[in-house]
Image (cartoon, helix red, strand yellow):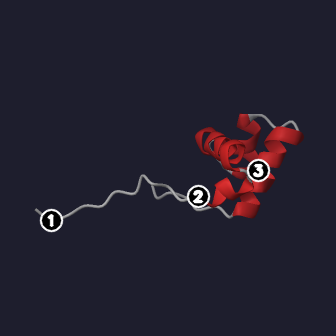
Amino acid sequence: MPRKNYTIEFKQIVLDAYEHKGFSLKGIYQKYGVHHTALMDWKKSVTKYGWEGLKRTSSKKKVYTKK
């Protein structure tokens, strides 16, 4: 299953719903379709880097070479 790309604005809306509007992790998934691990990653990024942290790209991209 391919990875979903979310806009920064969408991530902010989802984080706001979780942190300030009382949504549970299950409620976030049901309303927005965001898995709890993604939400927690976003939250960690915002805590560590501020809202700019949501712009960070994953360094987990794999590059395969021919042998």
Q: Position of residue 5 (x, y in %)?
A: 58, 62
Q: Would you name the residue on which mark 2 appears?
A: 56
25 to the left or right of 58:
right
Most extreme residue toward the front is 49
In the image, residue 63 sits, relative to residue 15, either above or below, namely below
Earlier in the chain: of badge 2 and badge 3, it is 3
- Amino acid type indicated by mark 3: Val
**In the rendered image, which residue does mark 1 sit on?**
66
Comparing 66 with 23, the one in front is 66
Report helix, strand or loop for mark 2: loop
Q: Reading the chain from its start, which is encountered first: label 1 or label 2?
A: 2
What residue appears at the point 74 percent right and 59 percent down from the top-left corner?
A: 10
In the drawing, what numbered circle is on residue 3? none
- Residue 37 location, x and y as percent? 59, 39
At label 1, the amino acid type is Lys
Residue 14 is marked as 3
